[in-house]
Amino acid sequence: MIEEKRACCKKVSGNGPYGAFHPHPCRFKATVCHEGKWYCSKHDPEVVGARRKKREDEVDTRITAERASEHVKFAAQVCASDLLKAVKLVLALDGQDEVYPSGTYNLKDIPLSWVVRLDPKAKEQLQNAVKKYEDMIQSH
């Protein structure tokens, strides 16, 4: 039995200055029948749909990652000044005598100490971080 050659039913636009205005039939041999129409392997609706879905998923993944990155940057910008104030407070309290808040506090009879003791390396790192971020804030 001789197999009948079928042409892909899809119309395509050609290249060149007039290609978009003169669609012509796809030149590839049809290999797949879908809902009574014959398509080549490139124009098979299932393959086209899978390609489109893959491309959309890649774009969605990229956009989600960009938004997450922007969110982190924005959160860091918003929190930077408060963090800087907290670090300056820790540095200011370092080395002072312990101060207890006035009033009665009872956390299982443990006194609350508001003074932080830093080791010299940690203190130096915090001071360097404060200087770096103050310089960055002033430069923008």
Image: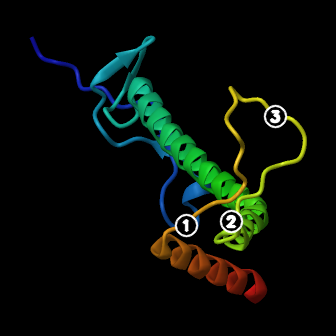
The residue that disc 2 covers is 90
Amino acid at circle 1? Leu
| Mark 3 or mark 2, earlier in chain | 2
The residue at the point 67 percent across, 72 percent down is: 91
Tell me: residue 88, above or below residue 56.
below
What amino acid is found at the position of numbered circle 3 in the picture?
Answer: Tyr
Direction from residue 48 to residue 109 in the image, left or right: right
Secondary structure at badge 2 equals helix
Q: x%, y% of residue 105?
A: 81, 34
Residue ID for mark 3: 105
What distance separates the C-alpha of mark 1 from that of mark 2? 9 Å
Density class for disc 3 (Cα within 10 Å; few <14, some 14-19, many ≥20) is few
Query: Dots 1 and 2: beta carbons under 8 Å?
Result: yes
In the depicted structure, whether residue 70 falls above or below residue 119:
above
Q: Alpha-carbon distance for marks 3 and 1?
A: 25 Å
Q: Position of residue 4 (x, y in %)?
A: 22, 20
- Residue drawn at x 78%, y 62% as measured from the top left: 82
**Amino acid at pointer 2:** Val
* Element class at badge 3: loop
Query: Which of disc 2 and disc 1 is earlier in sequence?
Result: 2
Judge by depth and name the residue closer to the eye, 137 or 22: 137
Q: Residues within 10 Å of mark 2 (few under 14, many from 20)?
A: some
Callout in the foreground (3, 1): 3
What residue is shown at x 24% (from left), y 26% (from top)? 5
Cα–Cα span, label 3 and label 2 = 22 Å
- Tell me the quarter of the picture where residue 75 sits: bottom right
Above or below, 102 against 14 in this view is: above
Judged from this view, the residue extending furthest toward the left is: 1
- Res. 118 mark: 1
- Indicate the secondary structure of the residue bearing disc 1: loop
**Is 80 left or right of 31, judged from the image as shown?**
right
